[in-house]
Amino acid sequence: MKGTLARGREVLQSREFRLLFGSRVISQLGDGLFQAVLVASVVFSPEKQSTTVGFAKATALLVVPYSVIGPFAGVFVDRWSRRRILVVTPLVRAAAMLLLLLGDPGSAPFYAGALIALSLNRLFLVTAGTVTPRLVPSEDLLVANSVATVGGTLLTIVGVFAGGLVSDAIGDTPLVIATTALWIAAAVLASAIRTSLAAAFGPGGALHEDLARVGRELADGARRLVHTPRALGPITSYAVDQFLQGLVLVMSFVVFRDRFSQGVGSFSWLVGAGAVGTFVGLATVGFLEPRLSKPRIVSIAFLVSGIPLLLIAPIITGFTVLVGSFFIGVGYAWKKIPIDTMVQQAVPDAFRGRVFAVYDVGQNMARVLAALVAVSVVTPGSVAWDVAACGAAYVLWSPVLPRWVRREPALIVRSYAGGRADEVPRTVVLAGVEESVEVERSWREDRDGQRLLCFRLRLADGTSIDVSRPEHGDRWHLDREVVA
């Protein structure tokens, strides 16, 4: 069996995927440089503007376009020429950089250019993900997605880190020029792809109908989420984490800019420390998974994020802030992966896309809310207390998720014969919806020293699910799902 690195190299031998991968990572390197420009221009540069107000503006520029456009991007990707999106969007983003060069930070042209560049980025990345299956064999798709995601994320971090240091040394103009050149190069690489990227089937209705449909599906996803406590709990926990991370990031800016009079280069080190922590978390979460339940891993992750903040609150220095950022990065990885898995397991495939779209919007809005709250709460004189309060909030939330999911069944199974050993399931309730099921087979098995009654049930959409409960109990568990 080939190792991960060998399979990654094999995927990159495909000329077409290599072009797409190159276009994507070059574009995301430019994204990192551009984020550094925004932080330098909006958070650190205006002498008369408070750090918290600057951060709120930067957050609005970075997050709101992604949140608003994200759920609707697929409608346009399925209608427009995907090749043209990959080529034109980087060129339009490059042209928007002229508005940043012509406008002063905080001016209307500056914000217009930033909004154009950031909004189109979501469309570009969605399109790149959509066309990937056209460029690699199906058996290599997982590896191709991993290579693209890891490579793009790494290059974005490199861009932010290098961009902050360059901005401190020689200013923002060289970064704007470099970003423009990178986005033009991304367009050139994408234009060289020869494989047909057109959608297999055209859109089914008018544009306004498809947009309205997406809006209805988002509302339906929110309803499903409310009726699925085992998904709502993890998503709420992640939103809490994102809110607290946003507050801590503002406090870090206040420390570096207002207390120590440092420039945007301090942001680079902050991002670097958090990124190292995240990679450590990603490398170690697999060790925890077979030893602890997912809610327990999340609980520990909140402690890992919160306890260091309580310890550094009395001794706020540049170094201790970086230490706190590192542990928040570790905790982030230990939360994100188990939470995503819990949501996937709690929501049936028929509703999963809609729920994850709501999940995406919710986590982004938590960051925006943190920025707005920070404007009225965080000041240079209150940082120590604010850091301690965030640390305490992390610690206090630690036991919430295990208790939340423990009191909620993964699913409800209703049977002809009631809760006895000879029962025959007739309906299940998943994501707040009750639907009839057909029993494909039943069996008993021993698992972890416990005798279980098990069924494979077929849902109306063709999906089969395996469910089980203790032979002398009444709490059902969703073991696995098999999509037809």
Image: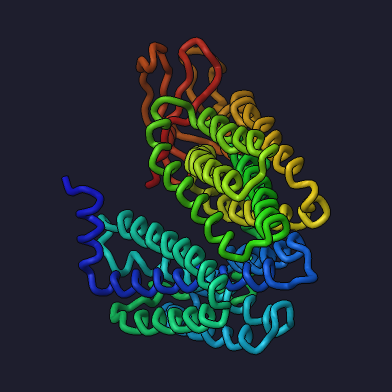
Looking at the image, which is closer to me, 427 or 316? Answer: 316
Looking at the picture, tell me which residue is in the foreground, 484 or 131. Answer: 131
Q: Is residue 475 left or right of residue 288?
A: right
Q: Quadrant of residue 110?
A: bottom right
Q: How is the image coloured?
A: rainbow
* 342 to 13, vertically: above or below: above
The image shows residue 293, relative to residue 253, as above or below, that is above
**Residue at 62% over, 57% down:** 217
Up/down of 197 relative to 50, above or below? below
Quarter of the rendering containing residue 144: bottom left
In the rendered image, the residue lying farthest to the left is: 1
* Residue 168 shown left or right of residue 10 in the figure: right
Q: Nearer the viewer, residue 187 or 215?
A: 187
Horizontal and vertical percent for residue 178?
47, 80
User: Above or below — where is 236 with respect to 142?
Assistant: above
Image quadrant for the N terminus? top left
Expressed as whole percent of the image width and height from the top left, the position of residue 423 reads 49, 18
Residue plotted at (52% across, 50% down): 274
Residue sitting at 45 percent across and 23 percent down? 468
Look at the image and tell me whether residue 366 can be seen. no
Closer to us: 62 or 357: 62
Q: Is residue 76 visible?
A: yes
